Amino acid sequence: MKTTLTRRHALGFGSAILASGALAACGRQGGGSSGGDADSLTLWLGALEDSQRRDIDRLVEAFKQANNITVNYETHSTDDLKESMRQVSGTNAGPDIYWYWEGPGLGGDLVEAGMSLDLTDYYAQYGWEDRFTAASMAGITQYGGYHGIPWTLQAQGLYYNKTLFERAGITTEPSTYDELLAACDALKAADITPIEFGGTVNWHVMRLLDSLIETKCGADVARSLVTDKTGWDTEAGVTEAFTELKTWADKYFNSGYMSISNDDSSLLFWDGRAAMALEGTWFNAQCVDNGMDPQEVGIFPFPTGTGRLYGFGEGFYINANTPKADLAASFLDFVTSAEQMSGSGGAWAAVSVNKEVEVSQDNPLDALWPPILESSEEMYNNFDQALGLDETTEYWRIQNAVLIGDMAPEQAGPAMQKFIEANS
């Protein structure tokens, strides 16, 4: 069975709890890369920080001790995981379980391709809907049925180096966009790189463009751009956002950003050579893992003025082609239990998707996120999760063309609208 996505499904997962029309479980075709060993499962994950690798090792070992089942996992870089999943789509070569981002443009593409098993029956069997927060469940039910199980709810904001802010004379966290620009100018005047980005992965700089569109267009228009797919060529805020993007790149980014990755640019923040990073809750663990004193780091939301928080969800999905769906579901039930998720601390996110799990005290940065999350009743997704794959590719092409000066900012919106209409 193939689930049909509609643009209504592209609404931010924090904006509404979408109706969860139950679909029958997809047919299982047998096969799968875990092969015939009935006592093992295969699991694909994204790249892991040290703390995350230690935690997945802990979970896999605990599951083995409890059930005598071996879980063999593989890790992939962000882009490699996307490519690998596309390559095994429609085949039996995929894993039994895969970790992936939510949203129509990423997890939704695999749902549409028939790679995700509808877990409606397992939600009823294990009582999962009562286990997770409403915000995290919205990302699971957005396609119709229950695709995946929540693993993280990642909010994003501006991490800053307190020492560099103090050196530039910045005494308070910016709460408006104008205050943020003033802080960037103060950092420049103090000969400090205001913010780091890596341009070889399009989605890193995209975070700023998404936030600028939210700032300049407002929530209603920004939502309409990715759901109704209209207004790119008529809304003045779109041109203003691309204009601001070009200004930020020319004035505030680290030099040479287009030729380095996000991993390389993050080193600039961790080493104290850039004052800010636009990252998410996963960055808490990375800061500590890479030697930063968490007491020297602050976090504030990008001041869009709309009241919405930037973020996305991640989940574990069961491959529709695996013959071991029951076993895979038992593993997911085990690792998302309150007992096991409490043991994870803040390795995966600052705030757990399990209602019963308290914020970890291990990393002081984790405690900074709950007030930020509570300050907003709605989220807006990263555009590569809200747009379709081909639209995201075009969005990145236009973004990069503006950044390197091959396209004027006022041409960007019309170019995006032209692509959408030509491919709708």
Image: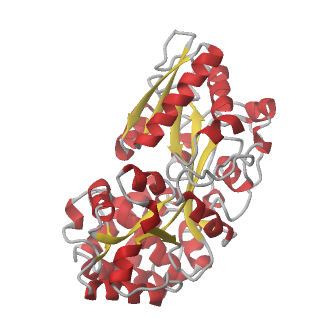
Depth order, front residue of 406/353:
353
On the question of residue 111 being in view, the answer is: yes
Residue 350: where, in percent of width, then height?
57, 54
Residue 145: where, in percent of width, then height?
72, 42
Colour scheme shown: secondary structure
Residue 25: where, in percent of width, then height?
71, 30
Reply above or below: 260 against 58.
below
Q: For the point 46% across and 90% down, which residue is it? A: 178
Depth order, front residue of 203/362:
362
Depth order, front residue of 207/269:
269
On the question of residue 26 being in view, the answer is: no
Reply above or below: 366 against 221.
above
Reply above or below: 274 against 66.
below
Residue 100: where, in percent of width, then height?
51, 43
Query: Where on the picture, by quarter, is residue 200?
Result: bottom left
Q: Quadrant of the N terminus?
A: top right
Q: For the point 66% across and 47% down, which residue is it? A: 140
Query: Where on the picture, by quarter, is residue 76?
Result: top left
State left or right for residue 376 relative to residue 392.
right
Query: Where on the picture, by quarter, is residue 315?
Result: top right
Depth order, front residue of 100/178:
178
State left or right for residue 19 relative to residue 103.
right
Q: For the point 48% across and 85% down, which residue is it? A: 237
Reply above or below: 126 against 11.
above
How many numbered marks appear?
0
